[in-house]
Amino acid sequence: MSQKTEKLIDKKGLRIDGRKPDELRPIKIEVGVLSNADGSAYIEQGKNKILAAVYGPKELHPKHLALPDRMVLRCRYHMAPFSVQERKSPAPSRREIELSKVIREAIEPAVFVEYYPRTAVDIFIEVLQADGSTRCTSITAASLALADAGIPMRDLVAACSAGKVEDMIVLDLNDVEDKVGTADVPVAYMPNLGVITLLQMDGILTSEEFEKAVNLAIEGCMKIYAMQREALKAKYVSVKEVEE
Amino acid sequence: MERFIDPLSVHKFAVGVSMDLQFQKRDSGQIVLPGEPLGVIEEFIPDAGTYVKDGVIYSKVVGRTLIDYLNRRVSVFPITRGAKVPKVGSIVVGQVSSVQTQLATVRIFKIGKHMLSGFFTGVLHVADAQLRFTESMFDVCKPGDIIRAKVISEKNRMYHLTTKDKSLGVVYAFCSKCGDVLQQRGRRGLQCSRCGNIEKRKTAIDYGKGII
């Protein structure tokens, strides 16, 4: 990728896109954007644009894959060919397959999976435009889509990344910071229950820095959670106004 | 993991919200989201749409609260389209996908008033087709027909259906010779409007009204 000679953090302590170290990118969330899906959500986090759709519960085919005591949660994370600077092949890459698994495992603890035995619930995540931390943004959108589909959940899942850029722990990395920075720590969090459902680290951090990064990411998750709530409520408040 | 989350702050958050609820007057009809604390088990009996963890009652769906102070019950009524699966007793609509003399297979695409995004498979046995004795399943329905039925069992990983009611049975049928829609002609007889072929079905009382 293009090697940046400019500093990632300027003398005032501001980041490359003018944010403070503990500042999130601007977020816009919309719930219920697709009429053909059972549940859906669209999120813009900085330059990230991600669409999540949920179908189900439905009968699982082939039937031998069905589990007798719980539903099967299937997740497909996919990046559109036009989501990155150089055209990405639309075939699922190794990275996308891994992220699908990682996202599913981050969402699964929040879902009452045992309520619909022998069924499947599909989550489709489509990255329309990628700008770093797409796995976190995807989890945020996917949990909203699940809630919109009416699938019983323990809690919403909010996700946010933190990382180290030029000896500074910063929140919500963008693409440049992710690539040039020293470390990246994505965290998914259930805010009401206080449970971490995803914790990864890519790069090198000391244990103090790691702790700081995780705590910062959780703070970010709480802020994102507030926005998730607002977006989910907004859909149903407006529905009510139409009905009356 | 506990090293990184301050358990106290988490506790404060969970309890803090429920304490807030205690101080303000809790009204029914508020919109709540999954994971939202509604109270503690000492004050309410958790009902539909809620779950309990560590003594705190949480909502598990997007819905409106119903707080019954008389019976001390709290429940959440979903306002989402809702995840629907066939249950014993539910009325379902489906398309007959295959018929044998004893059994018909139905692709269920509607549960109650709820259209499904996928489908479920149900089976209808001759013994459950009509109140009176039925010789063959071919006198009840044919492949392609749209049928309304009731779920009587979900044993053996299958939805067993019945059409033993006036309101249940075929609601839309096609001629097995030319494929045109069959019209009701008198009792128990259906006639094709194109080729005049007469066929037998177990029809619902509102056959041909376009209601499914």
Image (cartoon, coloured by chain):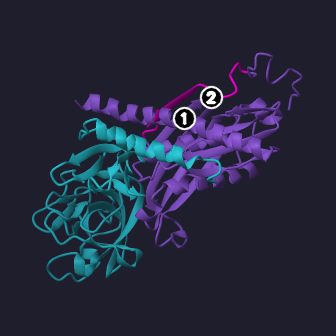
Chain colours: A purple, B cyan
Report if residue A26 lies within the magenta region. Answer: yes
For the point 39% across and 51% down, which residue is it?
Answer: B60
Question: How many circles with numbers are drawn on the protein?
Answer: 2
Query: For mark 2, what is the residue?
Result: A24
Q: Is residue A131 visible?
A: no
x then y, percent, for residue B204: 17, 63
Quadrant for the C terminus of chain B in the image:
bottom left
For marks 2 and 1 on the same chain, the one whose residue lies earlier in the sequence: 2
Residue A12 location (% of width, % of height)? 76, 16
Give the image location of residue B194, x and y in percent. Answer: 26, 56
Amino acid at dot 2: Leu
Determine which residue is flagged by label 1: A224
C-alpha span from label 2 to label 1: 9 Å
In which chain is the residue bearing label 2?
A
Residue farthest front in this picture: B8
Q: Does the stretch in magenta take in A65?
A: no
What residue is at 58 percent from the left and 46 percent from the top? Answer: B6
In the rendered structure, which amino acid carries the disc numbered 1?
Answer: Ile
Which residues are the magenta region?
A17-35
The residue at the point 43 percent across, 37 percent down is: A32
Q: Is residue B185 above or below residue A240?
A: below
Are the numbered discs 2 and 1 placed on the same chain, yes or no?
yes
Q: Chain of mark 1?
A: A
Q: Secondary structure at mark 1?
A: helix
- The residue nearer to you, when weighing B47 against A237, is B47
